[in-house]
Amino acid sequence: MAGADRSLAIAGLKPDHLRGTVPFMTTDTPFHLAFPVHDLEKAEQFYGQLLGCVIGRRSLLWIDFDFFGHQITAHLRPEECQQPASNAVDGDAVPVRHFGAILPWDRWQALADRLQAEEISFLLAPKIRFKGKPGEQGTFFIRDPSGNALEFKTFKNKAQIFARGGDDDHI
C-alpha cells in the first residue's frame, strides 16, 4: 500500500479509488444516538416490543435500547419532538432527520413483512431504490410514536454501501 493510502487506512479513511468497493464500517464500533420522545411507555412498546430491541438501563426520564447492536437512548422531552423537514431523494420526500439500520436482505424483508402485518403506517413503503445502479438498496421509512423517522435499508451488494452513483452525487 502506498504511503498516502496507508495513512488514510490507518485513519479509518479510504482513498477515492477504493470507495464503494469494500465497506469499512464495523460492528465493533457501535454508535450511540440520543433522541427525544413524548412518552417513554410508548417508546418502550415501539422499540422494545415492535422492533424487538432489548431494553438496557432506564430512569424516569430515559430508556436505553440495543438497536441492532447499537445503543440508542430515548429521552423524555416532549417539547423537542417535531416533524422533520424532508429532501427529495430518488423522487421521494425523505425526512432530513432520521436514523435506522442496514440489515441483511432477509432480515429487512422479514421486518417489512412484520410491520405490514402489524398494520404499521409506512412513511415510505418498502421499495427498491437506485435499481440497477451502484448502491442499489431496499428501503422503507416509519415513524415512532413521537414522530422520529426511522429508515431501514438493505443492499444487494454490501460492498456498495458507500458506492457513488454518478449524476445524483454532489460534492
Image: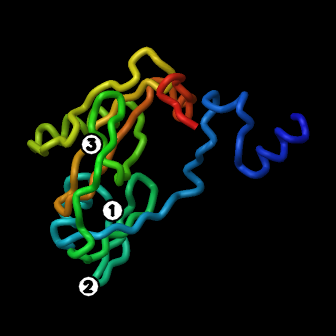
The Cα atoms of the two marked residues, 3 and 2, are separated by 29 Å
Q: Earlier in the sequence, mark 1 or mark 3?
A: 1
The Cα atoms of the two marked residues, 1 and 2, are separated by 18 Å
Q: State which quadrant residue 60 falls in.
A: bottom left
Label ID, residue 60: 2
Q: How is the image coloured?
A: rainbow
Q: In the drawing, does residue 17 fall left or right of residue 127?
A: right
Check disc 3 and give the amino acid type.
Answer: Phe
Q: Earlier in the sequence, mark 3 or mark 2?
A: 2
Q: What percent of the width, then of the height, locates residue 94?
A: 30, 41
Q: What percent of the width, then of the height, locates residue 81?
A: 24, 67
Q: Which residue is mark 1?
A: 54
Q: What percent of the width, then of the height, locates residue 102?
A: 42, 41
Check disc 2 and give the amino acid type.
Answer: Leu
Label ID, residue 93: none
Q: Nearer the viewer, residue 135 or 101?
A: 135
Q: How many labels were placed on the picture? A: 3
